[in-house]
Amino acid sequence: MNFIGWIIVACEISFWIVILLGLIVRYLFNLKKLGLVLFALTPLIDLVLIVITSVDLYMGATATVAHGIAAVYIGVSLAFGKSMIQWMDERFRYYITKTAAAKPVKRYGIPFAKHYANGFIRHIVSFLIGSAILAIMIYFIDNPSRTEALYGVIKVWALVIAIDLCITASYFIWPKKEKGINHSL
């Protein structure tokens, strides 16, 4: 794995450590403002990643899939970040602190399909953000032989979006059923 690949891994691990620390200080130590400050640090992790990636490319590196994944990571982080934090917050409150009134909701049927469709819309937003970052990188490098991998990342991600669209549609056609319940009549 190259330098940028390790930076991406470090940023992803840092993201989850910062979120976990935010939850710990928020609920176990009752320091809500400090927890909020830690949650607010997550965009800085994205900023560090994009700066390091950009500097690496500016210094003459040939773009690799890892450079492209940095843009994917940022797009996903911006589009899904708040919902990922909320998801983790709900589970932390219920399973760790036992302060949540109700167990986190498990969806089935059309409610699950609608929830999944909302995630698909976020996926499109993340694709638009990440692809815009990739397009900016391609534009500023202005050397197709150095940016070929970035085009490849966009193509593969577009294919993943198409597959996700099929999965999303399938949940409306064949709604997810609750396990252990006899659904035949």
Image: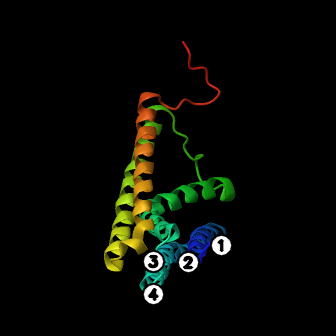
As measured in the structure, the alpha-carbon distance from the residue carrying label 2 to the one carrying label 1 is 10 Å
Neighbours of disc 4 within 10 Å: few (<14), some (14-19), many (20+): few
User: Which badge, 3 or 4, comes first in the chain's sequence?
Assistant: 3
Q: Which part of the image, by quadrant, shows the N terminus?
A: bottom right
For discs 1 and 4, the disc positioned in front in the rendered view: 4
Q: Amino acid at mark 1?
A: Phe
- Counting residues from the start of the chain, the first of labels 3 and 2 encountered is 2
- Up the image or down, 60 lies above or below 145; here it is below
Describe residue 19's horizontal placement relative to residue 112 as left or right.
right
Q: Which residue is mark 2?
A: 34
- Total marks shown come to 4
Q: Nearer the viewer, residue 137 or 52?
A: 137
Q: Residue furthest bottom?
A: 59
Q: Nearer the viewer, mark 3 or mark 4?
A: 4
Say whether marks 2 and 1 touch (CB < 8 Å): yes
Query: Disc 3 residue type?
Result: Ile
Residue at horizontal 46 percent and vertical 67 percent from the top: 68
